Image (cartoon, helix red, strand yellow):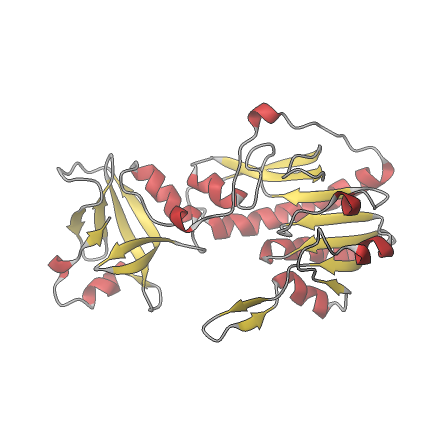
Amino acid sequence: MKDLRVIFMGTPDFSVPILKSLIENTNVILVVTKLDAKVGRHQELSFSPVKKLALEESIMLFQPEKIRNDYQVILDLNPDIIITSAYGQIIPKEVLDCPKYGSINVHASLLPKYRGGAPIHHAIMNGEDETGITIMYMNEGMDTGDIISKEIMPILDSDNAGTLFDKLSLLGRDLLIKTLPMIINGTCLREKQDESLATYAPTLKRTDELLDFSKRTLEVFNQVRGLNPWPLAYIILNGEETKVLECEQSYENFDKNPGAITRILKDKIGIKTADGEILITKIKPYGRKEMLVKDYLNGLKDKTSVMVSI
């Protein structure tokens, strides 16, 4: 496949192992990624992880502000195939139709479930026990194209969004390299997606991050791990926004309303849920580094003054 002329489109860390493998196995002639982002207090420009790799490998880069309006560079290169992975923009039909072998996407869910921009977060937050990678032909819809191949991966209780991102990225890399020869020689299958089974995983909103203790213990637990390590769930602790990184489930029976503090242990803060409690064990207070709850509590003059606002 070394002579296969590939245009790769991607942006975050998830896409990097996939691009690395394509560089090793094919001829990547162009990398398309999102515009550099301003980050931090000083609003310094930051390159996407995919851009950093492309620069290291001296591969031609293209960063259109809106690809639906600016794509002639892609057409002029006449690629054999376009491969996308978490690029972040809707790609116009003129681009999708230009390669000889079509345009394909490496998507981090078992389509048609969890179409959209945050499938890994939502799968964990919704308590799924498995997810996977789908390689699909792209069309103008949001992850609605024909399925070429799939591979399933279990979601462990110990997984959070970060660990699952890493594992699925490697799974996507390997499945893509196994699938590409079938696409090139025309032996791959094309399976229409069952629209009746479609679910959606939209990009996370600020409102998704606030913990809702009126929900069941398991739901709150899944929300915390589904948002870790980014963007992180939060509560209002002692009047300040406090990120919650880790917690434990408990089904002790407390005669309190959801959201009330149930108990303060030496290394945990208990908060009542609909059917038990969540024991918070690791946090990031506003403007401070992440820390164990034990260390947070040790820094308080009066542990009985701890309050959670809902």
Q: Residue 293 location, x and y as percent?
A: 26, 59
State left or right for residue 278 relative to residue 256: right
The picture quadrant where one finds residue 33 is bottom right
The residue positioned 77% from the left and 48% from the top of the image is 82
Q: Is residue 156 visible?
A: no
The residue positioned 52% from the left and 43% from the top of the image is 202
Q: Residue 107 location, x and y as percent?
A: 63, 43
Q: Nearer the viewer, residue 260 or 20?
A: 260
The residue positioned 68% from the left and 46% from the top of the image is 174
Q: Residue 145 location, x and y as percent?
A: 69, 35
Q: Nearer the viewer, residue 250 or 203?
A: 203
Q: Is residue 260 visible?
A: yes
Q: Nearer the viewer, residue 111 or 64?
A: 64
Question: Going by the picture, which residue comes out furthest to the bottom?
Answer: 42
The picture quadrant where one finds residue 24 is bottom right
State left or right for residue 159 relative to residue 11: left
State left or right for residue 204 relative to residue 170: left
Q: Residue 157 location, x and y as percent?
A: 41, 42
Q: Is residue 30 above or below residue 198?
A: below
Q: Is residue 96 above or below residue 129?
A: below
